[in-house]
Image (tube, helix red, strand yellow):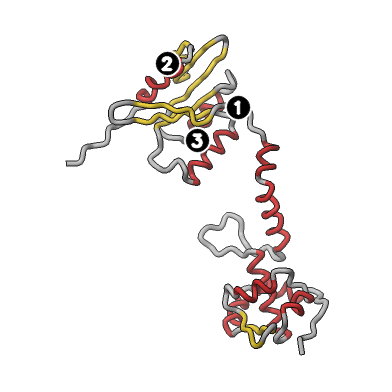
Amino acid sequence: MTQKKEKRLESDLYKPIQKHFTQLGYEVYGEVNDCDITALKDNELIIIELKLRLNVDLLIQATKRQKLTNQVYIAIPKPNYSLFSRKWKDLCHLIRRLELGLIIVTFLKSSTRMDIAITPKPFDRKKSMQQNKKKREKLLKEMEGRHVSHNIGGSNQTKIMTAYKENCIQIAYYLENYGPLSPKALREMGTGDKTLPILNNNYYGWYERIERGKYMISDKGISEIKEHPEILQYFSEQAIPNKKSDS
């Protein structure tokens, strides 16, 4: 028979945390004025809130405790999913952003262990933005590459119109309307630096190379770009520097 998993209580988290802070010289108390755990040493006050899972209610409760001290921790049992997962990393970012601390309690077969995963400290937004400078630049570049507001914010499980796909549609549209063209001619018409890689990769199967350095639109391309009338309308209204086909 499979042994039933032992049901945990919030109070099961108390002992290992109490032991840890007591060994560090703190006076530790349970349930003081609605605080699950309080610890005091040399006028340094620590408050720890216990929960069986990390949720919004716990975060709200913990941020309220920051009115009393800047040393506020939340303590939870070790999650049953990977601590290397994107979900866990995102949760840890939120905890750091709220300037809270995090304690993980691990229940082993014969003992219980607690680890301080995050120490409460001020969150440096400027440093965080500097570390994510490339992501910001990528976001701005994607915005600059879009010409039509095709996507609806908040949509789930729907295909997203990216700047890359817009660029593919632009190239296909010009090939359909101006006949076979070289990458150079297309760039002169405003299709940008990614023209040659787009033609070579042919991700959507919209292009056919008819000879070295010259491409035409495929039947698949003619059919599928019609699914995006707003984008076709946009490119049809643009002034094109060079409409001459290669001869």
Q: Position of residue 24 (x, y in %)?
A: 48, 15
Category of crowding for the residue at label 3, using alpha-carbon neighbours closer than 10 angstroms: few (below 14), some (14–19), many (at least 20): few
Mark 3: which secondary structure? helix
Q: Amino acid at mark 2?
A: Gly
Q: Which mark is residue 121?
A: 1
Q: Position of residue 182 (x, y in %)?
A: 72, 81
Quarter of the image where the C terminus is located: bottom right
Q: Nearer the viewer, residue 32 or 127?
A: 127
Q: Which mark is residue 56?
A: 3
109 left or right of 174?
Answer: left
Q: Position of residue 218 (x, y in %)?
A: 60, 84
Category of crowding for the residue at label 2, using alpha-carbon neighbours closer than 10 angstroms: few (below 14), some (14–19), many (at least 20): some
User: Do the CB atoms of the residues marked 3 and 2 lie less than 8 Å apart?
Assistant: no
- Residue at the location (70% across, 86% down)? 180
Mark 1: which secondary structure? loop
| Residue highlighted by disc 2 | 30
Mark 2 / mark 1, whichever is N-terminal = 2
Nearer the viewer's eye, disc 2 or disc 1?
1
- Figure check: 99 above or below 135: above
Mark 3 / mark 2, whichever is N-terminal = 2
Give the farthest residue toward the left.
Answer: 1
Q: Quarter of the image holding residue 238?
A: bottom right
- Residue at the location (63% across, 73% down)? 228
